[in-house]
Amino acid sequence: MLENSTPSPQRSQLDCQIRLMREADLPAYKQLRDGMLAGHPEAFTSDARTELLRDAESYRGRLSGGDGGANLFTLTAWLDGQLVGAISCEHEARVKVRHVAHIVGMMVSDGLHGRGVGRQLLQRALMLLEGEPVLELVTLSVTSSNLAAVRLYESCGFIRYGRLMGAIKLPDGRLVDKDLMSRRLR
């Protein structure tokens, strides 16, 4: 989640089309992801240089039911025919933890932070997760210094249960902490 600015009263909230990612969306998804990784290295565990080498087809596992069923879905946000945001949800098939889902890869185009795109994606993802009878809990990690994202997650019912100090080591040697958050689905 990359919303580093707080919404101001003057900024209108956008009404995006939120839908499941389709195979035809993979090139746009790669373009958005590559831009986010390059512009916000502190926000993602993946690094831009490695991910640039991947082709769009390599993200096929992010489609609903992809990666052997580990990826529940990826939602995309579209505004005027442009992909402006995405969020993925995953889970494991192991019996003892299959009731837990994980939100990963939340991203919103830079020019749209604080305009409600991230909230729309998150709310739709939570609605879909709540519709899965086996799921009871959803987790995520967020860069601790990304206060706007932390506030968004808290406003949607997530609570911080820990902090992973030095979770990400940037190329310049800086360490970035991640807050670990969860929300009950039922």
Image (cartoon, grey):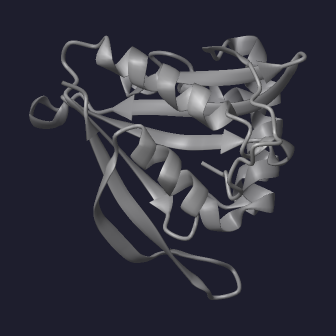
Residue lying farthest front? 9
**Residue located 75% across and 43% down the image:** 9
Q: Estimate the x, y position of residue 147 in percent, counting from the top left.
A: 56, 62
**Is residue 46 among what the camera can see?**
yes
Which image quarter is the C terminus in?
Answer: top left
Relative to 103, 8 lies left or right: right
**Residue located 64% across and 77% down the image:** 170
Please tell me whether residue 86 is drawn above or below residue 107 in the rendered image. above
Along the viewing direction, whichever of 73 and 149 lies nearer the viewer? 149
Q: Quadrant of residue 80?
A: top right
Q: Quadrant of residue 114?
A: top right
**Residue located 80% across and 41% down the image:** 112
Q: Estimate the x, y position of residue 78 in percent, counting from the top left.
A: 78, 20
Relative to 162, 106 lies left or right: right
Residue lying farthest bottom? 173
Q: Estimate the x, y position of residue 157 in percent, counting from the top left.
A: 34, 40
**Residue located 81% across and 40% down the image:** 11
**Is residue 44 among what the camera can see?**
no
The mark total stands at: 0
Q: Estimate the x, y position of residue 99 in percent, counting from the top left.
A: 18, 29
Along the viewing direction, whichever of 158 and 125 lies nearer the viewer? 158
Q: In which quarter of the image is residue 17?
A: top right
